[in-house]
Amino acid sequence: MDFQSNIIQESRSMESLEKQLICPICLEIFSKPVVILPCQHNLCRKCANDVFQAANPYYSSRGTNITGGRFRCPSCRHEVVLDRHGVYGLQRNLLVENIIDIYKQESSSPQPVKVKVQQPKCVEHEDEKINIYCITCEVPTCSMCKVFGAHKDCEVSPLHSVYQKQKTELSDSIAAMVAGNEHIQAIITQMESTSRSIEENGQHQKLLLSQKFDGLYAALEERKAELLARISAEQDSRTAQVRELVQSYRQRLESNSALVQNAISSMDEPGEANFLLMAKQLLRDLSGAVHLLPMERMEPGFEDMEQFTLDTEHVEELLRVIDFGVEDEEDGEDEEENEGGDEDGDEEREPGQRER
């Protein structure tokens, strides 16, 4: 009876997992590659392309000047804006693809049959099977150890009850890890969007700078190159920082995915004692990964490069020393001159006051 309930429970879990892996467009299990939208919903890339083509009938990957496009997520109606790469510019959800592979392997494998599991023997009493769990020492042991062995003063519990408890804890840890991985995936998507914004804003500032220099004298060409180099250096510096963070998050994601896959594999261990022998370390690893502090993130507005906006409304004498932010320095000099004028005025009024 216990075995039958376990099979029913596992069947229901597989059905619940299958529902989470259904594409809202084709209503089939996601076919790779799977892309993740900015709203964190997933689609088959082929289905995403079909939705995109339907929303943009005049778009064509060849023979058109149209760059990018947009469509709405079929799950939440959030508007998805694409760059010139179209749906091929969307981030692949490697975690979902890995889960699909594992699900297909489990689905294709034959239904588990109850087999007689070889019960491990106690190290201290070789003829005794491990049949209880020492709660005090947190290790499986045998009845002889409890009667007059190393665990005679410890609190013990039936092996099965601790097995069910730790298996539930492991399942919860896997769920928490999956949720954490989805959060990391969202951060990676945001970081890549920030990287693209930096590149676009940098290109925009370069264009403005070039347009303002086109009408100036040939003597400004050298200065023009210097200012362009400064923008490029800042753009490259910021882009490099973001890409470095993206790489760090990718490594975290791959590590977590491997840990989750290892934990999922351990769930198939039929022997309670064997499972408990490895469950403690898995729980410790998963708990440490879940509670790991988040890594560095970009500050809001990191992609803005408005400080490179150039004002050309200066007199010709200032052109050879033109620089970013000169207007602020001039405002400071004007304030100093005004303060000096006020002091002079005060000095001029003093004699009149004494005469009165």
Image (cartoon, helix red, strand yellow):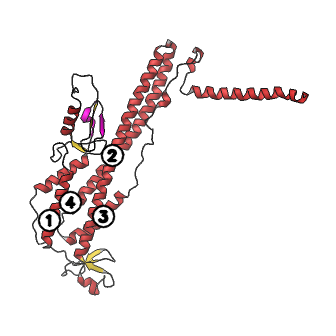
Q: Which residue is mark 4?
A: 265
Quadrant of residue 10 in the image? bottom left
Q: Which mark is residue 283?
A: 3
Q: What residue is shown at x 30% (from left), y 64% (from top)?
A: 283
Res 201 visible: yes
- Magenta-drawn segment: 73-91
Q: Amino acid at mark 4?
A: Ser
Q: Do the residues under discs 3 and 1 have CB atoms within 8 angstroms? A: no
Quadrant of the image containing the N terminus: bottom left
Label 3 is placed on what type of residue?
Leu
Give the distance between the C-alpha atoms of the residues marked 4 and 2, in whole angstroms.
26 Å
Q: Which numbered disc covers residue 179?
A: none
Element under disc 3:
helix
CB contact under 8 Å: marks 3 and 4: no
Q: Nearer the viewer, mark 1 or mark 2?
A: 1
Residue at 41%, 30% in the rendered image: 201
Pick whichever, 81 or 221, lies toward us: 81
Q: Is residue 254 above or below residue 161?
A: above
Instruction: Where is residue 31? Give x, y as percent.
Output: 17, 44
Q: What residue is disc 1 on? A: 8
Q: In the rendered structure, which amino acid carries the disc numbered 1? A: Ile
> Neighbour class for label 1 at 10 Å: few (<14), some, many (≥20)?
few
**Mark closest to the chain's N terminus, 4 or 1:** 1
**Precedes in sequence: disc 3 or disc 4:** 4
User: For the point 15% across and 43% down, which residue is it?
Assistant: 26
Distance from Cα at disc 4 to Cα at disc 1: 19 Å
Tell me where residue 202 sits by quadrant.
top left
Three-letter amino acid code of the residue under disc 2: Ala
For disc 2, the marked residue is 186
Q: Is residue 112 above or below residue 179?
A: below
Q: Can residue 250 be seen here?
A: no
Q: CA distance from mark 3 to mark 2?
A: 25 Å
